[in-house]
Image (cartoon, rainbow, N blue to C red):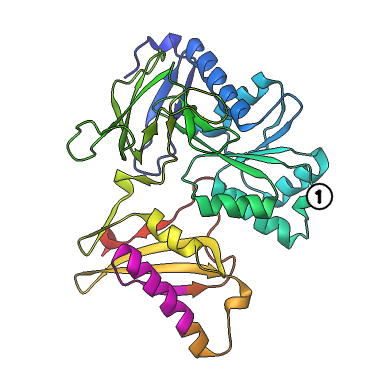
Amino acid sequence: MFALPLDEVVRVHSSSGTTGKPIVVGYSRGDLNTWTELTARVASAAGVHSGDRVQVAFLYSMFTGGWGMHYGIERIGATVFPAGSGNTERHIMMMQDFGTTVLVSTPSYALYMAEVGERMGVDFQKLPLRLGLFGGEPMSDLAKSEIEARLAIKATDNYGLTELMGPGVAGECECGCGLHVAEDHFLLEIVDPETGEPRAPGEEGELVVTTLAKEAFPVLRYRTHDLTRLTTERCECGRTLARMEKVRCRTDDMLIIRGVNVFPSQIEDVLFEIEGIAPHYLIVIDRKHNLDDLEVRIEVEEQVFSDIMADMVEFTSDVANKLQSVVGLKAKVTLVEPGTIERTAGKAKRVLDQREQT
C-alpha cells in the first residue's frame, strides 16, 4: 500500500491498535524531515525552547508518539530524555535529578505520575517542571485542569494520527483556544458523519484530511472518525492558521447500549465534576438475560469511604442519577479503592465490552 518502492521507505510505524488491527504506514527520508519540522512547530507553539529539558514518557516502539515528538524537540535545540514508558518511580527520580522542565506523555499517564509522586512525598511545586505536551488520547478540560493543579504545570494538547503522519498535525499555543493546524501540509474538511456531506464552518462533524506533502503514504480525503469543528478566526497569539477544537469523541468510540448512543467522554465529564472521584474509571458493558447492562467502576479518594452504609449508598446513588441525566441510562456504580483500576503508560483502557463474550 506504499506509494514508493520499499527500498525508498526508510522507516515503518503502525497505530497502537486500540480500535482494531494496527494500521501500518511508511516514511521516506523526506517524510521524516517533514514530520520533524511539524512536531517542532507544535512543541514551539506550546512553549518549548532551546533551553528546555524534555522528558518523553511515550513508548518508543511502532507507536508514532514518542519518535515524532523526540525529533521535533531536538530540532528546536532542547535536551531530550527518551525515558520511555513504565517504571513511574524512575520517571519521578529523573524529574528530580535532571531538572526536567517539560513532560511529554498521555494525559492519563501524567495523572498517574502525579499520583505516584504524591505517594513518594514529592512536591511538584518545587520542581523545575513547567509545561506538558499531551496527546495519544482525548484530554477533557477537567482532566487538563487537574493535571495543571497536581503537577504545577501548563498543560497543552496536540493532535495527530498515524495514517496522516503521527503527532504534528495540530497543536495548542499558549492561549489554549484550539489547536493550530499545519494547513500547508494538511487539507481539513468537516463532514456529516452519516451522509458525508460538508458541514458549515463552526459546525461539529467528522474530520476528513488530505495530506499535501507525504511521499510514502499519502491519503486523500481520509475519514478520521474524530468529531471536531474548525474555525478560521485569528488567534490571540497572532497565528492565522485555522484551528480545530480538541477531539473529545470518535464515531467508532460510540457505544450503543439498550438502543442509546453513549460516548465514554460523556461519562468522564460527569465523573470529573463530582468531588471525591479519582481520575480513573472503567466502563463495563455486559449482557444479562438478553439485556445490556452498564456498570461504571470508579476509584474514589479515601475520604469518600465511610463506615456508615447509608452514606455510601447515597454517594453511589447520586453518581448514578447524574450519569442518567446526561447519558439517558441507569448505570450500576461500583466504588473501588484507589489503585484498583489498571494504570498504563500508553493509552488508557476505559471500556470493557463483554457482550460478545456472552
Q: Reply yes or no: does residue 328 show up in magenta.
A: yes
**Residue assigned mark 1:** 126
Residue at 23% across, 37% down: 192
Q: Quadrant of residue 6?
A: top left
What is the crowding at mark 1: few (fewer than 14 residues within 10 Å), some, or many (at least 20)? few
Q: Is residue 141 above or below residue 323?
A: above
Q: Residue at x 34, y 36 (%)?
A: 202
**Residue 176 x/y as whole percent:** 55, 39
- 67 or 35, nearer to the observer: 35
Residues shaded magenta: 314-334
Q: Nearer the viewer, residue 331 or 116?
A: 331
Q: Looking at the rendering, in which quadrant would you find the C terminus?
A: bottom left
In-front residue for pair 126/122: 126
Q: Residue at x 44, y 74 (%)?
A: 334
Residue 248 image position (x, y, % from top left): 41, 46
The spot of residue 107 in percent (x, y) is 55, 47
Our reading of the magenta stretch's main secondary structure is helix
Q: Is 166 situated left or right of 37 in this image?
A: left
Farthest residue, direction left:
195
